[in-house]
Amino acid sequence: MRTVEAPFEHVLRMSDDVGIFEHASGSTPERHHGYCVDDVARALVVVEREPRPTQALLEVADRYLDFVVSAQGPDGRCRNRLGLDRRWQDEPGVEDCWGRALWALGTAAARGRDEPQRDRAAARFALGASRRSPHLRSMVFAALGAAEVLAVAPGDKVARALLAAAVRAVGRPVRDAAWPWPEPRLAYANAALAEVLVAAGELLGDVRALDDGLHLLGWLLEVQTSDGHLSVVPVGGWARGEERRRFDQQPIEVAALADACARAWRVAGDDRFSRGVDLAIGWFLGENDTRCSLLDPSTGGGFDGLTPGGCNANQGAESTLAMVATLQHASDLVRR
């Protein structure tokens, strides 16, 4: 397992006293596009995961938490988009932003730097976790926050109920060796579905969910590996019977694979999954279909996807945070 330090320079460059800007032109934040909870929540997760945060990271973590809390409505639903004028541009709902907010709140509740921060995040997690979403990935992202809470508070009834609800939403693998995936189409952040099942096996003692999750993750890793490197499902996804396009591949898909493989390796001890983490790290460092490194060493940013001509030159928040999240696993698995 290679060791690569996760860079935070561009994360800090993209952040201000409110949150993290969504888009960048090259490495320059495009401030006029404003902010979204999806990205601020991602940022809070990676900062809270960092084992030795700098003072600058501790400070932005507080801002990110403030942002996520401010996005939450009194009934636990969540807004997503905030303009540069500091006005919310949408109404609260239970789409992906709700799920990602709960993921971030659960992570802060479990890993926050002090008791007041953890307590604040835990209370807001409990508020949001009282809701359910009809959208599968929204439920899955929220359940990853529940898994964070259960890692430190295994008896938490709200978190246990949310994680169990997500397992039911994912469902069972299809009885088809060529396409066991529980959806007719691979979309985005696919490995998060398998990770939730593995988490339920680990934290709820659900042996069937664990077996299903490991099976699905192994299949997903196999179909997204080509010639010894990752070649992940691009924008638009892929369904059985369709011609599979190679581009544009997105960092979010690779980061989801890294997260799921890291958990599966920790829970099951299967070397397929430690290899999966290594493949994900390699994808960002140039072991991919175009041999282009998606890490810009001069800025610490992550490029916005893999195109037929190489890397997209822009370094937005989502792609940078996906890269940072993936590289964080390198040192974690080495320590193990």
Image (cartoon, rainbow, N blue to C red):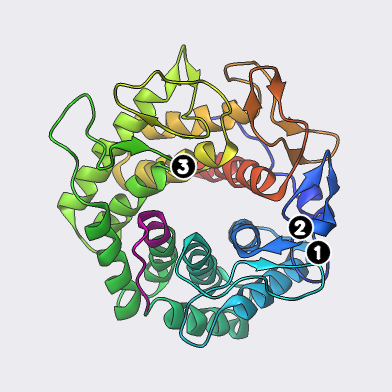
Q: Which residues are magenta?
A: 131-140
Residue type at the position of mark 1: Ala
Picture layout, residue 107 above or below residue 232:
below
Query: Who is closer to the viewer here, 310 or 123?
Result: 310
Picture layout, residue 244 above or below residue 218:
above
Rounded to the nearest whole Å, what is the CA distance between mark 3 and mark 2? 22 Å
Rounded to the nearest whole Å, what is the CA distance between mark 1 and mark 3? 31 Å
Q: Position of residue 66 (x, y in %)?
A: 68, 77
- Residue at which label 3 appears: 188
Dividing the picture into quadrants, the one containing residue 151 is bottom left
What residue is drawn where x is 56% and y is 24%? 247
Labels 2 and 1: the sequence-earlier one: 2
Q: Residues within 10 Å of mark 3 (few under 14, many from 20)?
A: many
Exactly how many numbered labels are in the figure?
Answer: 3
Residue type at the position of mark 3: Tyr
User: Left or right of 247: which side holds 259?
Assistant: left
Q: Is residue 271 visible?
A: no
| Circle 2: element type | loop
Labels 1 and 3: the sequence-earlier one: 1
Query: Who is closer to the viewer here, 270 or 212?
Result: 212
Q: Is residue 104 visible?
A: yes
Query: Who is closer to the viewer here, 77 or 221?
Result: 77
What residue is drawn where x is 24% and y is 42%? 182
Residue type at the position of mark 2: Phe
Per the rendering, the mark at residue 56 is 1
User: Left or right of 236: which side holds 270?
Assistant: left
User: Left or right of 24: which side holds 214?
Assistant: left
Per the rendering, the mark at residue 73 is none
